[in-house]
Image (cartoon, helix red, strand yellow):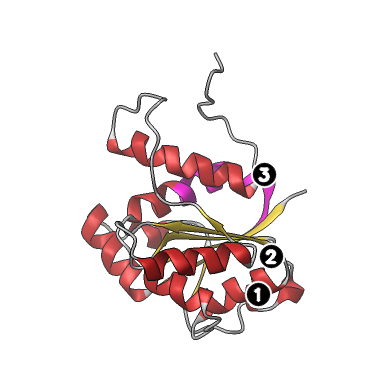
Amino acid sequence: MKRKIVIAITGASGAIYARLLLEKLLLLNTQIEDLAVVMSDNAKQVWEYELGNRNFEDLPVKFYAKTDFMAPFASGSARFDTMVIIPCSMGTLGRIASGVSDDLVTRAADVILKERRKLILVARDTPFNLIHIRNMATVTEAGGIICPAVPSFYSQPKTIEDVAMTVVNRVIDLIGLENDSYRWSEE
């Protein structure tokens, strides 16, 4: 089954995760029916600051404005099956946990949860306070998946991109796509 995926990029630090995920999804395009992207204004600023470019503008994906409630994934009838928020700010997570749908990101997350589809939040902030933890519990109890941007090192990554890719590969596994990546105890 080909996936219909929406990627939301918020203004938390960690633009490298979003960039690597989008690049990898484009490589895995034979498994994807539809790929849509929403970026907050802060996400664009963070991308430019952290990565030193605006290369997101050159990616061959459909971007939607954060105020575009006519986007197909703003309704369950469009049957998008997966949403990834990467990186996910604690403010976005809090709005999702409390059911506030004040922009396309939070509306789409609400739709994904109400339709019992896959919502993956790549939380980037650290450390967590009790409010963050309770919001994560609420989203988890509602069916979402909290996947903190915590890299692994057993693959012996050599570069910052390799380190970030350990998180991205985990996200791709959570989406359910076939992906050639390092597997523990496999030769």
Disc 3 marks which residue? 30
Q: Kindly indicate the quadrant of the structure image that contains residue 183.
A: top right
Residue 74 as seen in the image, left or right of residue 43: right
- SS for dot 3: helix
Residue 68 as seen in the image, left or right of residue 48: right
User: Mark 1 and 2 residues: CB-CB less than 8 Å, in contact?
Assistant: yes
Q: Kindly indicate the quadrant of the structure image that contains residue 119.
A: bottom right
Looking at the rendered image, the disc whose residue lies closer to the viewer, 3 or 2, is: 2
Instruction: Report the disc number at residue 80.
Output: 2
| Residue drawn 41% across the image and 25% down it | 155
| Residue drawn 43% across the image and 52% down it | 148
Q: Is residue 50 above or below residue 65?
A: above
Q: CA distance from mark 1 to mark 2?
A: 9 Å
Who comes first in sequence, dot 3 or dot 2? 3
Number of residues whose C-alpha sits closer than 10 Å to that of mark 2, classed few (under 14), some (14–19) or many (20 or more)? many
Number of residues whose C-alpha sits closer than 10 Å to that of mark 1, classed few (under 14), some (14–19) or many (20 or more)? many
**Majority secondary structure of the magenta segment?**
helix
Who comes first in sequence, dot 3 or dot 1? 3
Note whether residue 10 is visible.
no
Q: Is residue 128 magenta?
A: no
Disc 1 marks which residue? 111
User: Mark 3 and 1 residues: CB-CB less than 8 Å, in contact?
Assistant: no
Number of residues whose C-alpha sits closer than 10 Å to that of mark 3, classed few (under 14), some (14–19) or many (20 or more)? few
